[in-house]
Amino acid sequence: MTRLPLVEQYGLIGDMQTSAHVCDDGSIDWLCLPRFDSSALLGTQKHGSWQIAPAPPARRPIRRRSGL
């Protein structure tokens, strides 16, 4: 079971027509389109959520120059 984020981890973004709840990890967990009084597009188990996040870090070689 995954733990749900705390309410303090969310921000609200909108444009006076619609809004979305965005978590501090970049996921959009609730979204109503095209208006505030529309049904939620995201935010249910059926519809899930979107997440914008960087890919896992790639392995990078460590390079050092001697004599500096």
Image (cartoon, rainbow, N blue to C red):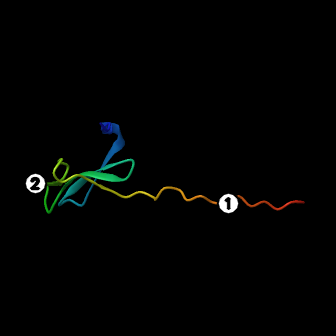
Type of amino acid at the residue the image marks with label 1: Pro
Q: Residue at x 9, y 56 (%)?
A: 38
Q: Is residue 54 left or right of residue 12?
A: right
Q: Farthest residue toward the right?
A: 67
- Please give the name of the residue rendered at 20% of the width and 49% of the height, measured from the top-left corner: 43
The quadrant of the rendering that contains the N terminus is top left
Picture coordinates of residue 41, whole percent (x, y) = 16, 56
| Percent position of residue 6, x then y | 32, 36
Q: Secondary structure at mark 1?
A: loop
> Quick one: label 1 or label 2, which is nearer the N terminus?
2
| Residues at marks 1 and 2 touching, judged by CB atoms closer than 8 Å | no
Look at the numbered disc 2 and give the secondary structure of its residue. loop
- With respect to residue 5, does 36 lie above or below? below
Number of the label disc, if any, that sits on residue 20:
none
* Closer to us: 41 or 48: 48
The residue indicated by pointer 2 is 39
Left or right relative to 6: residue 34? left
What's the amino acid at mark 2? Ser
Residue under the point 14% across and 63% down: 34
Between 30 and 51, the residue placed more toward the observer is: 51
Q: Residue 50 is drawn in which quadrant?
A: bottom left
Q: How many residues crowd around disc 1 within 10 Å: few (fewer than 14), some, or many (20 or more)?
A: few
Residue at image x 18%, y 47%? Answer: 45
| For residue 64, side relative to residue 2 (left or right) | right
Query: Which label belongs to residue 61?
Result: 1
Q: Please name which of the two marks, 1 or 2, marks the residue nearer to the observer.
A: 1
Kindly indicate the quadrant of the structure image that contains residue 67.
bottom right
Tell me the CA gap for discs 1 and 2.
49 Å
**How crowded is the residue under tag 2: few (<14 C-alpha within 10 Å), some, or many (20+)?**
few
**Looking at this view, is 40 or 16 the one in front?**
40
